Image (cartoon, rainbow, N blue to C red):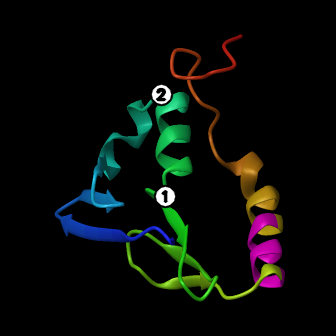
């Protein structure tokens, strides 16, 4: 059975209801202070992206299709890899890979 995901947005807080029992709240302004392990948990539980019933990658925030097939997804992955160096590293106190 395919999981269902319901989204409600109020200001900058996104409420995700997956399987009607997993309740996640993501405050987008708090991402800078979120531990990497918590971000990983949210990502794995479709707080940001999910695959819909048509097998398309969708944004949980907007519900819009981001990639309709694997080639488009591969392009997105390559783009993310390209811009990765422009994004600041996680502070050591939030990182899973503390130095």
Q: Main secondary structure of the magenta part?
A: helix
Seen at 38% across and 77% down, the residue is 62
Q: Is residue 33 positioned above or below 48 on the image?
A: above
Q: What kind of element bears circle 1?
A: loop
Q: What kind of element bears circle 2?
A: loop
Q: Would residue 46 be found to the left or right of residue 20 on screen?
A: right
Seen at 31% across and 59% down, the residue is 16
Q: Where are the magenta residues, as a range?
A: 71-77
Residue under numbered circle 1 = 46
40 or 51, which is in the foreground? 51
Q: Estimate the x, y position of residue 54 in percent, counting from the top left.
A: 59, 89
Residue under numbered circle 2 = 35
Rounded to the nearest whole Å, what is the CA distance between mark 2 and mark 1?
Answer: 17 Å
Q: Estimate the x, y position of residue 21 in percent, counting from the top left.
A: 28, 52
Magenta stretch holds residue 74: yes
Crowd band around label 2 with a 10 angstrom C-alpha radius: few (<14), some (14–19), many (20+) = some
Q: Is residue 3 positioned above or below 97 on the image?
A: below
Q: Estimate the x, y position of residue 9 in percent, counting from the top left.
A: 22, 67
Seen at 52% across and 65% down, the residue is 49
Crowd band around label 1 with a 10 angstrom C-alpha radius: few (<14), some (14–19), many (20+) = some
Residue situated furthest front in the rendering: 1
Magenta stretch holds residue 89: no
């Amino acid at each position: 059975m395919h999981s269902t995901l319901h989204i409600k947005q109020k200001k900058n807080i996104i409420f995700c209801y997956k399987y009607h029992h997993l309740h996640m709240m993501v405050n987008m302004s708090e991402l800078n202070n979120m531990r990497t392990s918590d971000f990983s948990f949210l990502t794995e539980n479709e707080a940001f992206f999910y695959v819909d019933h048509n097998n398309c990658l969708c944004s949980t925030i907007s519900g819009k299709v981001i990639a309709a097939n694997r080639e488009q997804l591969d392009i997105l992955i390559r783009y993310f890899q390209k811009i990765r160096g422009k994004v600041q590293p996680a502070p050591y106190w939030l990182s899973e890979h503390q130095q």
